[in-house]
């Protein structure tokens, strides 16, 4: 199973400097190529393997891609939620790679992106259940450890989410989309009642789960913890449902087919109902959080497109992301 690739042009790392930092004779590096946000590499030093994460190249939004925060977050979460990879070492000096970075343990498994492995054609129920179990496990982590309690301020969580993501939208937009203004106004004016807080991943989706290569019902790792905090877990569920049945999955210029449509997969309604039954939480505010999830996805895609639009990246994967943004905005607006 090959999950790495040669490093993309312009995203190379200084191998000699990394070897000196690790105090080893030599390191080799290849890239995990599928992410659209932070840059993630496989670093090998003799018999040891590490995953290296650093911010993307070019200007980034304020407080985004905070590697030091993600390292400290994993340090707090890993003991209570084993699917979170164990962090190993942090470098806050931007002089080495151009930005802070950290190393974490490597986990091995399969990440489902555009299609199921051929031998997993009948595993949709098991994968659905693994996804649900993992989300319930995350939201059931007791918030007693001071290290966990320090990860966020639950009071006013949803209002801060709306304000922060709205600010990101207006900083990153490259064209006027009046429908998006209406979505922002709806989210600001219809804040749901505050809920009992939980550990919130904030980007929980199928391709952020790594499954055991021989037992697809087992989650080996949950990836991409950079936005994790404490807040309303319906935020996770709403975003997860957004990805589960992508609002722009039928867009010709969209990223991938939506693999979780079709026979064997839990439906959106089944997934939500099962989560509610097992967590004991109400779904009354879920429609709001589904709109918020689509809105956040549109902002993420727009931020990536803006980097391409302004020439801060030459990655051709991003050239048509403006079409994705427009499609997501229409999807969010249609649900108002």
Image: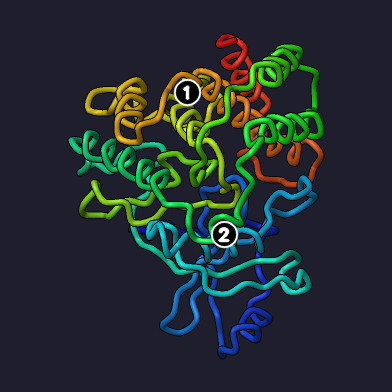
Which of disc 2 and disc 1 is earlier in sequence? 2
Rendered residue at 57%/21% (across/down)? 291
Where 92 sits versus 268, above or below? below
Q: Which of the pair 108/254 is nearer the observer?
A: 108
Rendered residue at 33%/40% (across/down)? 131
Where 21 sits versus 268, above or below? below
Crowdedness of circle 2 by 10 Å Cα count: few (<14), some, many (20+)? many
For this view, does 299 lie left or right of residue 238? Answer: right
Location of the N terminus (image quadrant): bottom left
Q: Quadrant of residue 193?
A: top right
Location of the C terminus (image quadrant): top right
Give the secondary structure at mark 2: helix
Crowdedness of circle 1 by 10 Å Cα count: few (<14), some, many (20+)? some
Rendered residue at 53%/27% (across/down)? 254
Q: Quadrant of residue 267?
A: top left
Q: Quadrant of residue 187?
A: top right
Residue 213 image offset from top left, x and y in percent: 26, 54
For this view, does 100 lie left or right of residue 139? Answer: right
Q: Which of the pair 66/41 is nearer the observer?
A: 66
- Camera-near label (1 vs 2) is 2
Give the secondary structure at mark 1: loop
Q: Which residue is mark 2?
A: 73
From mark 1 to mark 2, how far is it between C-alphas?
32 Å
Rendered residue at 40%/57% (across/down)? 81
For this view, does 308 lie left or right of residue 158? Answer: right
Q: Which mark is residue 199?
A: none
Where 239 sits versus 99, above or below? above
Where 158 sits versus 141, above or below? above
Residue 279 image offset from top left, x and y in percent: 35, 36
- Count the marks: 2
Residue 77 image offset from top left, x and y in percent: 48, 59
Q: Which residue is mark 1?
A: 249
């Amino acid at each position: 199973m090959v999950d790495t690739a040669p490093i993309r042009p312009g995203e190379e790392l200084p191998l000699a400097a990394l070897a000196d930092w690790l105090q080893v004779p030599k390191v080799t590096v290849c890239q995990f190529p599928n992410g659209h946000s932070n840059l993630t590499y496989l670093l090998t030093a003799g018999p040891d393997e590490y995953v290296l994460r650093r911010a993307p190249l070019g200007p980034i939004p304020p407080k985004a891609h905070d590697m030091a925060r993600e390292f400290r977050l994993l340090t707090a979460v890993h003991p209570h939620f084993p699917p979170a990879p164990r962090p190993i070492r942090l470098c806050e000096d931007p002089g080495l790679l151009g930005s802070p970075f950290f190393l974490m343990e490597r986990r091995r498994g399969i990440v489902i992106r555009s299609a199921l492995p051929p031998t997993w054609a009948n595993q949709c129920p098991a994968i659905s259940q693994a996804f649900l179990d993992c989300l319930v496990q995350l939201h059931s982590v007791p918030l007693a450890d001071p290290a966990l309690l320090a990860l966020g301020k639950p009071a006013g969580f949803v209002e801060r989410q709306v304000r922060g993501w709205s600010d990101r939208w207006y900083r990153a937009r490259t064209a006027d989309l009046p429908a998006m203004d209406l979505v922002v106004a709806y989210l600001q004016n219809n804040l749901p009642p505050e809920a009992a807080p939980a550990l919130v991943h904030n980007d929980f989706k199928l391709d952020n789960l790594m499954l055991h290569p021989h037992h697809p019902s087992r989650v080996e790792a949950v990836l991409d913890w950079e936005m994790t905090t404490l807040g309303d877990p319906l935020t996770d569920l709403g975003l997860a449902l957004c990805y589960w049945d992508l609002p722009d999955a039928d867009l010709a210029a969209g990223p991938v087919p939506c693999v979780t449509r079709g026979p064997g997969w839990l439906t959106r309604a089944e997934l939500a109902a099962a989560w509610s039954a097992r967590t004991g939480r109400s779904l009354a505010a879920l429609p709001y959080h589904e709109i918020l999830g689509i809105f956040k996805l549109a902002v993420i895609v727009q931020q990536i497109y803006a980097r391409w639009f302004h020439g801060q990246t030459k990655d051709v994967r991003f050239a048509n992301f403006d079409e994705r943004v427009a499609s997501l905005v229409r999807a969010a607006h249609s649900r108002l």
